[in-house]
Image (tube, rainbow, N blue to C red):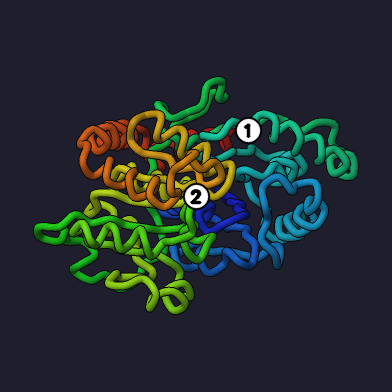
Amino acid sequence: MKILFTVGGSQAAVFGVAPLAAAARNAGHEILLAADEPLMAAAQSVGLPAVCITPERMRYGQDGMTATVRIDALLELTRRWTPDLVVGGLSHVPRVLAARLKVPYVRHIWHIAPMARRDRTAVAELQPQLERLGLTELPAPDLFIDLCPPSLRPPGAPAARAMRWVPRVSQRRVEPWMYTRPEGRRRVLITAGTRNLMLDTPGSSLRRLVDELTGAGAEVLIAALPEAAERYGAELGDVRIGWIPLDVVAPTCDLAVHHGGATTAMTLINAGVPQLIVPDNGYGKAVAEAVSGFGAAVMVDRHRPQAGQDPDEVTVAGCREILADPRYAERTRTLAAETAALPTPDEVLREIEALAAR
């Protein structure tokens, strides 16, 4: 079977789909990953055969603006390499492609933010493309795979096939400190994911947060892009900063402070690490609200500072609270156990194979 995986947005989209794509490849299927140019390096870093379809990064919610270019690029690709099944994510462009090719379509996302309204808007924006391609409607996905733990799914979320989260990130040479807990010290990880150079704290003072944590005896690691380490490393005191494989270091951490990325949050949940989340957009806020609502995190909304409080102190106080209260770690371990019990990518692949065999 030939399966076309499609991704857009940030590197997190590549890391999220990689376990299922690898499972398909390991089972003997031919796969290709259609991605934007900024995501090609991430695809290569996790061993996926990738082809570039557009030079610029796709942004969710812009289907109508970029649909013609993306659909035409995908149609050109599939004239030379015709898939038996298409796997897409947040964008509905791959769904148009699957309808045009008359092959099954699988939607594969981490469904935590209520997206029904945005989905309806995106489908409406694609109507001109349907007419252009001679399609009367955009059929529903043949299978919806959701990586979100059932306990975190929003009310009214569509029925889905749950699948276990399997961490997958770009790797580097692993050193003993990455997989070893420091003796006699707490370890706190800070990251802004792959989309931002550095975490934007409420008071824009990451140095103060680092100083407060190290002053309390914690070891601080900052997982960041190489260019961030070069630019900010000298300003942040006695910390390790640079590209750190999150899946390797997470099990050694007592707390993680991050931006609310779904890939980051799920990798930390998988490792049983409580979180302080400073969301950098609406989707990150939805992630933060869900995880904090379960009791596995504290959310600090930098766009809504608490009256009369120093915004940096709010972040520091949240870190102190999580480190002092074992209930956060206990709730995170509950989520970790829940996700560990979900079907693996190999198991879900069997359902995908059945779709193509119809």
- Residue 198 is left or right of residue 211, and the answer is right
| Looking at the image, residue 172 lies above or below residue 121 | below
- The image quadrant that residue 159 belongs to is top right
Q: CA distance from mark 1 to mark 2?
A: 19 Å
Q: Is residue 128 visible?
A: yes
80 or 253, which lies in front? 253
Specify the quadrant that holds the C terminus. top right
Extreme top residue here?
156
Residue 274 at what x, y percent from top left? 30, 42
Question: Residue at point 41% right, 29% down?
Answer: 293
252 or 106, which lies in front? 252
Residue 144 at what x, y percent from top left? 56, 33
- Residue 31 is left or right of residue 133, and the answer is left
Write down the residue under mark 2.
17
Mark 1 Cα within 10 Å, few/some/many (few <14, many 20+)? Answer: some
Mark 2 Cα within 10 Å, few/some/many (few <14, many 20+)? Answer: many
The amino acid type, in three-letter code, at marker 1 is Met
- Residue 329 is left or right of residue 82, and the answer is left
The amino acid type, in three-letter code, at marker 2 is Val
